[in-house]
Image (spheres, rainbow, N blue to C red):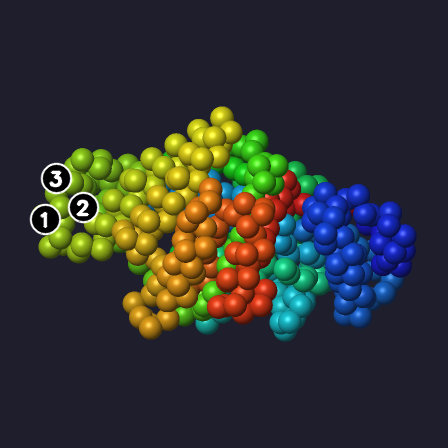
């Protein structure tokens, strides 16, 4: 750790540029210098100019394949991206955690007092902090007080997992400040999921947390969710001449908890009818044979979502192999197939609560019209229902694609991202 004045001087003189370049790229170097300096100044104004602090970063994530499969013990391919939550933090001897996130009220959490879930705090960031602390304590890890200022370039409600990145950030701070950085990113991810499920009140799988924390492109097999198998895939989309474009259509995830919860619930209802706990343990042929009876018990949508699961798991395996051998065409074809399945069978492109708002449907239509004459692919991004779509766009077509999307959804709605090689880290 260094004093704030020492960090500011290092940023001003360019002593930290090489590290910033490795995380964010040359085009945003000056922006990141200003961002890091601003975070130091904000921390100083809140918690003291003379504190010794360190920088921490957790990336956002993009799910590349395996839409809504992790919660039924399926397989996914995901990647860390170069949007992140940045924190300036220092330990304190009060036992209390204080986190001021840019644009939000300060969260003040006493882990000793807020050690059990409280339904009245569901959906609030202080519950995530308390949940991560409870998870650490439950696993026998150390918990202590700290002060932190965070600023995020991960848009909320965008499908880039701002909540998972925040949970991973709290776990990363506790890991480095009190546990000698010895806890693996997989363990931190599992604790983060626990916090979101139990303290935040939102059902979710483990994919978001792992993908934010891991770095690079990873294939994750959740057959045993307590010990997911994570494989790093050595494939550089930027070297192939492609950008991962994320289009934020402006939809908000705030009132969609029921929509998200229904997906795993319906899949598990089908699994139960087939004598299994989750679809990974069920037999697809048995599902096909029982469709007439299942229509009466679980309904057509649940059957379609189960069929999506089986098809998507096969696609993930094929796309993983395609990335291993460097076959971009096969990977992109899988992206398009995944998008079609998500729209038609998973049905997570718009919510039935508001049928007139279909920003994702419109963005997918525009992507197809704009990119159909080139080697590209597009699909719903993340959990769906609102938020974002993703597209793999050749570098020479990015400007045109951005113009089309920004004209409809607002300037800056289309973000051309890099896949980041590091996930949850102490930066320097």
Q: Which mark is residue 273?
A: 2
Residue 32 vertical position relative to residue 105 in the rendered view, above or below = above
Kindly report which numbered mark, 2 or 3, lies closer to the viewer in this rendering: 3
State the SS at label 2. helix
Kindly report which numbered mark, 1 or 2, lies closer to the viewer in this rendering: 1
Kindly give the residue lying farthest to the front in the view shown: 373
Q: Is residue 139 visible?
A: no
Quarter of the image for the C terminus: give it: top right
State the SS at label 1. helix
- In primary-sequence order, the first of circles 1 and 2 is 2
State the SS at label 3. helix
Separation of disc 1 and disc 2 at Cα? 10 Å
| Residue wearing tag 3 | 289
Mark 1 and mark 2 in contact? Answer it, CB < 8 Å.
yes
Separation of disc 2 and disc 3 at Cα? 12 Å
- Which residue is at 52% across, 37% downward? 218
| Residue wearing tag 1 | 293
Q: Residues within 10 Å of mark 1 (few under 14, many from 20)?
A: few
- In primary-sequence order, the first of circles 2 and 3 is 2
Q: Residues within 10 Å of mark 3 (few under 14, many from 20)?
A: few
């Amino acid at each position: 750790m260094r004093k704030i004045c020492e960090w500011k001087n290092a940023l001003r003189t360019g002593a930290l540029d090489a590290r910033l370049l490795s995380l964010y790229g040359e085009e945003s170097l000056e922006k990141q210098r200003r961002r890091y300096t601003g975070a130091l100044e904000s921390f100083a104004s809140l918690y003291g100019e003379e504190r010794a602090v360190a920088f921490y970063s957790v990336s956002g994530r993009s799910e590349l394949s395996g839409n809504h499969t992790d919660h039924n013990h399926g397989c996914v391919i995901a990647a860390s991206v170069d949007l992140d939550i940045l924190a300036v933090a220092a330990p304190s001897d009060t036992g209390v955690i204080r986190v001021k996130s840019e644009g939000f009220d300060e969260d003040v959490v006493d882990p000793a007092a807020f050690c059990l879930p409280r339904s009245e705090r569901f959906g609030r960031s202080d519950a995530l902090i308390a949940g991560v602390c409870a998870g650490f304590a439950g696993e026998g890890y150390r918990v202590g007080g700290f002060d932190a200022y965070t600023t995020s370039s991960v848009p909320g409600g965008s499908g880039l997992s701002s909540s998972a990145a925040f949970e991973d950030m709290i776990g990363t701070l506790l890991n480095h400040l009190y546990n000698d950085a010895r806890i693996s990113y997989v363990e931190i991810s599992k604790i983060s999921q626990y916090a979101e499920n139990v303290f935040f009140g939102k059902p979710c799988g483990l994919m978001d947390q792992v993908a934010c924390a891991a770095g690079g492109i990873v294939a994750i097999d959740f057959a045993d969710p307590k010990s997911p198998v994570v494989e790093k895939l050595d494939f550089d989309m930027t070297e192939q001449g492609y950008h991962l474009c994320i289009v934020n259509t402006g939809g908000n995830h705030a009132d969609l908890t029921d929509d998200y919860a229904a997906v795993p619930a319906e899949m598990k209802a089908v699994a139960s009818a087939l004598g299994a706990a989750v679809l990974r343990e069920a037999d697809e042929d048995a599902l096909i044979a029982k469709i007439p009876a299942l229509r009466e018990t679980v309904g057509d949508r649940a059957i379609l979502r189960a069929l999506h699961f089986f098809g998507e798991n096969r696609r993930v395996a094929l796309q993983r192999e395609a990335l291993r051998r460097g076959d971009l065409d096969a990977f992109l074809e899988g992206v398009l197939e995944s998008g079609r399945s998500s729209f038609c069978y998973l049905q997570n492109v718009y919510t039935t609560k508001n049928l007139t708002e279909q920003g994702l449907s419109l963005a997918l239509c525009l992507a197809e019209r704009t990119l159909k004459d080139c080697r590209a692919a597009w699909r719903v991004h993340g959990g769906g229902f609102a938020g974002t779509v993703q597209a793999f766009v050749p570098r020479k077509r990015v400007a045109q694609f951005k113009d089309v999307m920004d004209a409809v959804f607002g300037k800056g709605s289309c973000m051309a991202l890099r896949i980041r090689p590091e996930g949850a880290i102490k930066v320097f």
